[in-house]
Amino acid sequence: MSLEVDMYTELSANAVREAGFYPIFLTGREKAQSGTLYLNNVLAADSSVLAEYGCYVGEGVISRKRFGGMTVRQQIEKGLKQTNKFTLNELVEWFELSSSRLDRNIEHISNERWNASIAIGLAHGKTLFCFPWLNTAWIHSLRSRITTSVKILKDQGAITIIPTAKTEALNDIADYSVDIFLEEEKLS
């Protein structure tokens, strides 16, 4: 399944920099301030359409409020029941997840949450993975996790978005980068 995203939206530079707003918007967690988004040439009328495709990396896909804080294992298993694409063991091996951390909530597994989050997303059939805005220091700190995850996602035909101010920090990871200039930045 391929996913084509064509987006025109206007957001303030602060919203993008401070909240990593584009990735949040593309995963269906927030509504755009203005603009339109098409998925496979069909208007994505609301955030629920985007939520079907998107995974905000660093978080699980199941609301804590609705499910009372499911563990990483529970979230993966719930997704696998729906998709049957992978096994729990495959995802644990691919993303180098510690067996001792599988039975914790994603908030309590330190930097392994990046890998666990992507494993959860794949288990649920997500195809658009958006990282929060990462500065160069974070990219260097997470380099091995990001590199491993991006390779797996690419092999699965997924799209990965990693917003950053310094695209050169991703040169050996990303196939290509897209510079986004906001109106207020063009004027300065």
Image (cartoon, grey):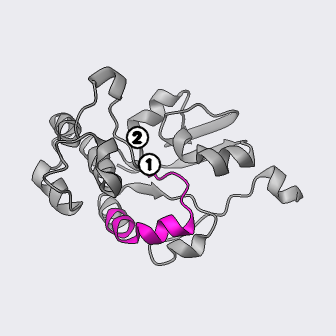
Whether residue 18 sits left or right of residue 117 in the image: it is right
Question: Are discs 2 and 1 less than 8 Å apart at CB?
Answer: yes
Q: Amino acid at mark 1?
A: Leu
Q: Which residue is mark 1?
A: 3
What amino acid does circle 2 point to? Answer: Tyr
* Relative image position of residue 120 (x, y in whole percent): 27, 45
Q: Position of residue 44 (x, y in %)?
A: 54, 33
Say the numbered circle drawn on residue 96. none
Q: Is residue 161 above or below residue 45?
A: below
Q: Position of residue 56 (x, y in %)?
A: 43, 44
Query: Which residue range is magenta in the image?
Result: 129-149
Q: Residue at x 51, y 72 (%)?
A: 170
The image quadrant of residue 142 is: bottom left
Q: Which residue is mark 2?
A: 53
Locate residue 183 relative to residue 99 in the image: left or right.
right
Describe the element under mark 2 as helix, strand or loop. Answer: helix
Which residue shows up at 81% across the image and 51% down it?
183
Q: CA distance from mark 2 to mark 1?
A: 9 Å
**Residue at the far right in the pictured view:** 187
Residue placed at 88% from the left, 59% from the top? 188
Residue drawn where x is 42% and y is 48% of the image: 128
Q: Is residue 65 above or below residue 163?
A: above
In the rendered picture of this protein, how many numbered marks are placed on residues? Answer: 2
Q: Earlier in the sequence, mark 2 or mark 1?
A: 1
